[in-house]
Amino acid sequence: MFCRDCMVPDVATGDPTDMLCLNCARQVVSPRSRSKYGGLTGHLKFRGSFTSVVKLSFARIDGLIGSNLPMAAYREEAWWSNSASSVHAKAWLDAGWEVQEVNLKEGFVVFKKVRDVPFKKRTKNKIEKPFKPVRVRSRRKPPSKTKVSQLYARIKNLERQRAEGQRNIRGLKPRRHHEKKLYKPDEKPK
């Protein structure tokens, strides 16, 4: 089912000879579309693993499907019939449930499980090759020559001070210039 027109180089690998089908890429990138009543189907499949009767209010069903039920669902019991020809009835029939009771006055529906349908937890599509983004160069400017020379001079001064032994020890002040002339470094004053 692949055609040459939809084959493009795979950017993730960086190898221009490694080709990827656009149809396959679309299936990985875009999620599957669900029907309007897919949330109700999933909920009933989940509940089917540990119960056989479920009572749901209309408001709860609105939350499960992510939108409001049509006005016919609030007004007519026939809307809740178990006919496979209607899209909304397929939601609970595909999950293995049938409508047992409808109460329009109080606004709830009772579903009864008629057959077991395994609940599969949705798993994300696993991509075999990890995505490697294209390398981007940083826009940060290199330091100017002036700053580099100032830092270099500072480092040289510190090295020179260490070599001469002129470190400041905390609490002690360095000897003043006239003291250096009066006494030699080896002898102590009397």
Image: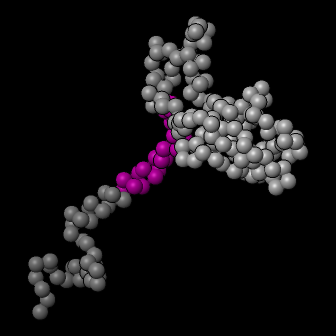
Q: Quadrant location of residue 174? A: bottom left
- Could you tell me residue 93's position as x and y percent? 68, 33
Residue drawn at 65 percent across, 31 percent down: 94
Is residue 179 one of those drawn in magenta? no
124 displayed left or right of 31: left
Residue drawn at 79 percent across, 36 percent down: 81
Residue drawn at 14 percent across, 77 percent down: 185
Residue nearest the viewer, comparing 118 with 160: 118
70 displayed left or right of 145: right
Q: Quadrant location of residue 80? A: top right
Q: What residue range appears in magenta?
A: 133-153
Q: State whether residue 174 is above or below residue 72.
A: below
Q: In this rendering, does residue 60 appear at all? A: yes
Q: Quadrant location of residue 76? A: top right
Residue nearest the viewer, comparing 183 with 94: 94
Q: In this rendering, does residue 178 appear at all? A: no
What colour-coding does the image apply? one colour
For the C terminus, the image quarter is bottom left
Residue nearest the viewer, comparing 91 with 17: 91
Residue drawn at 40 percent across, 55 percent down: 151
Q: State whether residue 51 is above or below residue 161.
A: above
